[in-house]
Image: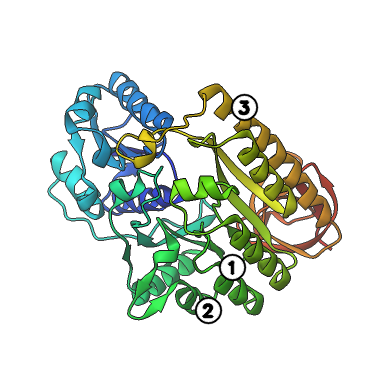
Amino acid sequence: MRVSVKTSGCRLNRAESNRFEAEFTAAGCEVVPLGAACDIALFHTCVVTASAEKECMRLIRSQRKKTPGALLAVSGCATALISSESLRAAGADLIVPQAQKDEAVTLILRHAGAAVKVAPQATAAPSDGVSRALLKVQDGCDFFCSYCIVPHTRGRPRSLPPEDCLEKARALIDAGFQEIVVTGCNLACYRHSGLELPDLLSALATLPGLGRLRIGSVEPGTVELELARLMARTDNICHFLHLPIQSADDTVLGRMGRRYTSGAMAQAISEIIRLLPDVGLGTDIITGFPGETGEAFRKTRDFLNAFPFNNLHVFPYSERPGTPAAKFDGSVAVAERRERARDLIALGANLKRKDAFRRVDRPTEALVERFDKRGLAHGWSGEYLPCAIRRVPRDHLRKLVAFVPDRAEGETLCGALP
């Protein structure tokens, strides 16, 4: 059978889909791109925003028209938020609830008439477009920020036993992956057998053959300082922290239900930079949250300008029915939300170029992910900046290389191997 898997949303969804694809392959199926002729189409969905939910339904309806004879299955967060009736009306034949997500491939194949129980798989080997392995160690969140639907779609925190994490990581290393990205719904909630996230990362970093570890998004006000200290004493953990601060106005943060103030966040980031002068910093920002005045927005903008952020993910606020914020007063006009988002996206591009420029003439390590027509190798630095590298042998594809950038072209670090 030919199977296509369409993934929407976050890195955690991608990690789950990687597992689905590997399990379909192990069961004897051929995984094909979405749009190709297929017998099964699986949509692993995201509904974190209203636009993501709308796109999810559009894709299902579109696929139903393109492949009327295929089995169309839906998994992911949409199954917890959108009614089964609506999903079926859009064209879904099978809905895999979140509670049965780990058995999704077995359920889908059974529904298609193949009576097979699939053994869990980690992921396939590195291939075109897949150079970094995603290691899911945790799922669920109980922070219940006022704007967020995720705790309602993914449930309470659950953590994979550390020995299972290590076993899966060893398999990824043996498969040939040089970079492992540790991911979860709320990584800071990782707790198992008395171990927390820094303990797990410390153990993963000692695995023989590991190139480097990258840490996914970590909630501010949790373990970011412990992680920075671990990075400072561990050579193979990328010096990059993604801390979704969402806003730098304390009134807005309070209404969001966030667990820190802008002052506490500024102190933490300052300490992180002291520990790791070369650190790359990323963040998520929501613009136009209910009650965000022009002055509150300016505080956020000024905060971002004060630190060397090089990756901004900016989203205009989107009401999610079922969350407290959907009923808050002080609604900001949609046009203003979008305008503020455009402003910060432009600022983010500026900050990224600035960060690239400051890294010229500094030793850099990049994972080679592709070669262009000119023979230039392209990949990402440990600090999450794009790199273009000359004189890289073709057999270094999907390998780590060290070079010294001699210039920055926009946000891209450019240089050559010695």
Q: Tell me if 234 is positioned left or right of 181 in this view.
A: right
Q: Position of residue 71 (x, y in %)?
A: 22, 32
Q: Nearer the viewer, residue 410 or 132?
A: 410
- Inspect the image, locate mark 2, and give the three-letter code of the amino acid beneath it: Pro
Where residue 337 sits, quadrant-wise, is: top right
Image quadrant where one finds the N terminus: top left
- Ranked by sequence position, the earlier of labels 3 and 1 is 1
**Can the viewer see residue 214 in this picture?**
yes
- Disc 3 marks which residue? 339
Q: CA distance from mark 1 to mark 2?
A: 11 Å
- Ranked by sequence position, the earlier of labels 2 and 3 is 2
Q: CA distance from mark 3 to mark 1?
A: 38 Å
Q: Tell me if 212 is positioned left or right of 192 in this view.
A: right
- The tag on residue 212 is 1
Q: Nearer the viewer, residue 82 or 176?
A: 82
Regarding mark 3 in the picture, which secondary structure is present there? Answer: helix
Mark 1 Cα-neighbour bin, 10 Å: few <14, some 14–19, many ≥20: many
- Inspect the image, locate mark 1, and give the three-letter code of the amino acid beneath it: Arg
Q: CA distance from mark 2 to mark 3?
A: 49 Å
Residue displayed at 71% across by 46% down: 302
Front tag of 3 and 1: 3
Image quadrant where one finds the C terminus: bottom right
Q: Is residue 311 above or below residue 196?
A: above
Q: Residue furthest top?
A: 65
Mark 3 Cα-neighbour bin, 10 Å: few <14, some 14–19, many ≥20: some
- Is the Cβ of the residue at disc 3 closer than 8 Å to that at disc 1? no
- Is the Cβ of the residue at disc 2 closer than 8 Å to that at disc 3? no
Q: Nearer the viewer, residue 211 or 199?
A: 199
Residue displayed at 22% across by 56% down: 118
Regarding mark 1 in the picture, which secondary structure is present there? Answer: strand
- The tag on residue 208 is 2
Q: Position of residue 381 (x, y in %)?
A: 68, 57
